[in-house]
Amino acid sequence: MVDRSRLVENPDSQASSAGSLAADRRLAPSELVLVRHAKSVGNLADERARKEGRGRLELETRDADTPLAELGEEQAAALGRYLRGLDGSELPDVVLSSPYERARHTAEIALETAGLEYRLVIDERLRERDLGVWDGLTRKGIEEKFPEEAARRTRVGKFYYRAAGGESWCDVALRVRSVLSDIRTEYDSAKVWVFSHQAVIMSFRLVLESLDEATLLGIDAENPLPNVSLTSYRRRADGALHLAEYARTTHLSAADVPATAEPPAAKEQP
């Protein structure tokens, strides 16, 4: 049952609250900055496999333990130098991270380089999308080993398709909705930085901007999210979080460190 006494902040006020539904009291961080992990050994293995036309990546670690590449460590340090140059009022109040090595280590290097002492808040809901039986395979490898599933994935589209034992983008979005609810509650009015992964950050965009499938897939295909890029949201007066910038990498160019991203993919139709 709705507690109607909570619908009006001041019962004696003559001002009409029609249409507001207490929007100005909605909990939200003042700023939410989403950071994709720096370039990893997995990114390098994927590049080599695609270039050489192989069906499987050459990796000795499980996905959760894949470390940063040497360039990735340089990228993370460049982000740290950017943080070090920020005014105190611009620094994060709390830093969250995926438990996966490449995201957590990106955060650790950046914070250490900046001279900042934060206790990282590790949250498993921020982990990368689980690819299930497709883990470690290139598109060629998937088509060779699972031709029927590859055809079904093409028909269904990657937004809804879930490989056996894995997750669809919608599954990741469910995790994001959950962690975002906690961020709103626990860190109201705070500056929150989140170190995570491409699919997770795109799912934040899906949820926060109410994007439809076609729009999200178009962004993902035409503007791939670079490593250690910044995607920021700022709180409006009504509590809504609006996109301030997407995939910014000026902190890398300022440090003369190369920005890296997967090549643009063909846009998929829903």
Image: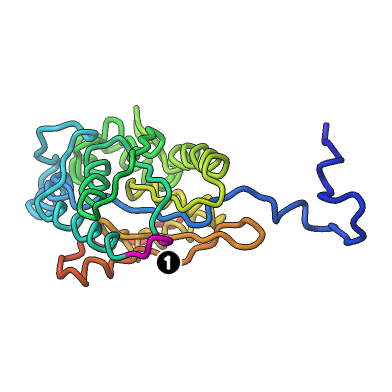
Residue at (20% x, 64% y) in the render? 259
Amino acid tagged 1: Glu
Identify the image quadrant of residue 269: bottom left
Q: Farthest residue in the top direction?
A: 165
Q: Farthest residue in the left direction?
A: 52
Start-end of magenta stretch: 86-90
Residue at (37% x, 32% y) in the render? 124
Q: Up-down: is 226 above or below 149? A: below
Verify whether residue 88 appears in magenta.
Answer: yes
Would you name the residue on which mark 1 appears?
Answer: 245
Identify the image quadrant of residue 252: bottom left
Residue at (41% x, 55% y) in the render? 33
**Residue 68 can be seen in this image:** yes
**Residue 262 can be seen in this image:** no
Q: Please state which of residues 49 and 17 is positioned toward the viewer in this rendering.
A: 17
Q: Up-down: is 44 above or below 78? A: above
Residue 81 point in image, percent of width and height: 22, 61
Residue at (41% x, 48% y) in the render? 157
- 152 vs 57, left or right, is right
Residue 267 point in image, percent of width and height: 37, 61
**Secondary structure at numbered mark 1:** strand
